[in-house]
Image: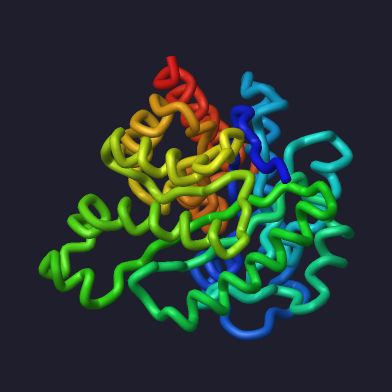
Amino acid sequence: MTVGYNQPLYILPFDHRASFQTGLFGWKGTLTDEQTARVAESKQVVYEGFKSALAKGIPKEHAGILVDEQFGSAILADANRDGFITSAPAEKSGLAEFDFEYGADYGKHIESTNPTFCKVLVRYNPGGDAAGNARQAERLHQLSDYLHGKDRLYMFELLVPAEPDQLERFGGDVHAYDRDLRPELMCGAIRELQDAGVEADVWKIEGLDRRSDCEEVVAAAQRDGRSDVGCIILGRGESEEKVVEWLSTAAAVPGFIGFAVGRTSFWEPLVAWRDQKLAEEDAADQIADRYYEWAKIFEKARG
């Protein structure tokens, strides 16, 4: 089986669900129809920013969105009609252990939304709960087989949160863990998941400070004949300064094909729009400018 996707890929992700529902609007529990419509409206602002960035010059064949079915089904349908690269999540939002948003019906939802990529967000630490990791790997293998059996693309967002004993080694310093241990654990996680039958076409990778760590991650992703598998760097909601640093570091490494930067692109403009301090068009323009800037930075660093 040949897996991989190695074309430039510049993703604007806004598939966040709890972040919008609770973080942006402060709503908990089951939403009313009006609240659901309001969340969907906020996502439409981000989508308008995406389209505006394409008008500014991001190549359509490299640009993509990542948005959820719950609040973004109309956006996915519109993007599919316009021939944009689309991605939609398969995971239930906010869980420590991966499970399917729609349970055993996940295939029906993938077919109905028809995204270019099916994306999963997974928290997987090789030094963590072995039984939990095995349960996740089995579900993720099942999805891998399903997608490749249907000639669909698999995007895997790997998060490696620190275990308490790992963090203790760094005196509780999360940044030191991120710099000095997480890269090694990410490579171990990728290899373990591959050995469990999980074949991602694109790995979404948390920001890495060192070029050598980026190279190690690519080597893990592309090992044993997986030479077409690509990696993209994600923003983690970090400051613009940090995102620029991560983009520049990753872009210089062959195998890193792009990025997925969400909250750093849209959060401040959306908050201002929510508070009626920015018109929808102005908020979308600000989002477009940031997304376009990431693409320029990435391309410049690639040389």
- Does 156 appear above or below 130? above
The answer to which of 175 and 240 lies nearer the viewer is: 175
Question: Does residue 141 appear anywhere in the picture?
Answer: yes
Where does residue 257 sit, x and y in percent of width and height? 53, 31
The residue under the point 36% across, 41% down is 216
Indicate left or right for 79 with 191 as reference. right
Indicate left or right for 124 with 3 as reference. left
Q: Residue 64 sits in which quadrant?
A: top right
Where does residue 66 sit, x and y in percent of width and height? 65, 49
Q: Residue furthest top?
A: 303
- Does 132 appear above or below 238? below
The answer to which of 186 and 16 lies nearer the viewer is: 186
The residue under the point 56% across, 58% down is 274
- Does 295 appear above or below 42? above
Where does residue 223 sit, x and y in percent of width and height? 50, 42
The residue under the point 58% across, 40% down is 226
Where does residue 30 sit, x and y in percent of width and height? 67, 84
The answer to which of 208 and 142 lies nearer the viewer is: 142
Q: Quadrant of the C terminus?
A: top left
Q: Residue 251 sits in which quadrant?
A: top left
The residue under the point 69% across, 79% down is 31
Q: Residue 146 sits in which quadrant?
A: bottom right
Question: Does residue 282 appear anywhere in the picture?
Answer: no
Indicate left or right for 247 with 6 as reference. left
